[in-house]
Image: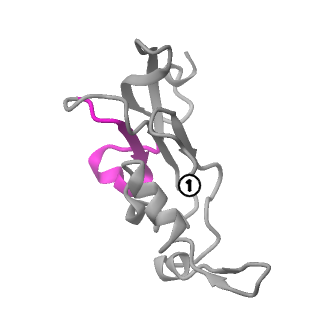
Amino acid sequence: MTNVKRDELAFLVTMGTPINAVNIWQVAARSYTDGNGTNHYPYYQPFGNALESLGGVPISTLELFQAGSAYSFVSCPDCGNPLTGNSALSTTVYAQQGQTGYQHGIIQRSLNGLFWPTLYSQEIQGSGIASD
């Protein structure tokens, strides 16, 4: 995600249960050791920072350990306008706000020949609308 150019579309989508954990603390504390023996915490460094640079909200990914969790994020930092914004998010983490983790949208070619999101809506898994 750190290599996405500001005029490119970025898609971040989960499939299945995205994170193997039992609580949000285990998700945040996930780490890996690189070939040099250095320990990294991707949630705090590269992942969180990269997601924020695209207009995302890293904290919305912490609860994706639950079965049936879904997350979809589409962004283009230099696209959009003040009314529509430049990213679209849907996640089961915000189910109380009507989000489902599924989106349906339309992208449109810009004056530069690039595509950017113009319309989007929340969808229900398996709905006929989402497969148009």
Give whichever of 28, 80 is nearer the camera.
Answer: 80
Residue span colored magenta: 84-101
Instruction: Indicate yes or no whether the magenta region holds residue 96.
Output: yes
Instruction: Indicate yes or no whether the magenta region holds residue 100.
Output: yes
Give whichever of 84, 21 is nearer the camera.
Answer: 84
Give whichever of 67, 57 is nearer the camera.
Answer: 57
* Residue 61 percent coordinates (x, y): 46, 62
What residue is at 61 percent from the left and 59 percent from the top?
18
Q: State whether residue 20 is above or below residue 86.
A: below
* Residue 3 percent coordinates (x, y): 58, 49
What residue is at 53 percent from the left and 56 percent from the top?
69
* Residue 70 percent coordinates (x, y): 52, 50
Q: How is the image coloured?
A: one colour
Looking at the rendered image, the quarter that the C terminus falls into is top right
Label 1: few (<14), some (14–19) or many (≥20) C-alpha neighbours in 10 Å: few
User: Of all residues shown, which one is farthest toward the right?
Assistant: 35
What residue is at 34 percent from the left and 36 percent from the top?
86
Q: Secondary structure at mark 1?
A: loop
Instruction: Determine the image quadrant of residue 52.
Output: bottom left
Instruction: Determine the image quadrant of residue 118.
Output: top left
Q: Total marks drawn?
A: 1
Q: State whether residue 119 is above or below residue 56.
A: above
Give whichever of 80, 88 is nearer the camera.
Answer: 80
Q: Amino acid at mark 1?
A: Gly
Q: State whether residue 36 is above or below residue 49.
A: below
Residue wearing tag 1? 68
Q: State whether residue 121 is above or below residue 61.
A: above
* Residue 84 percent coordinates (x, y): 26, 30
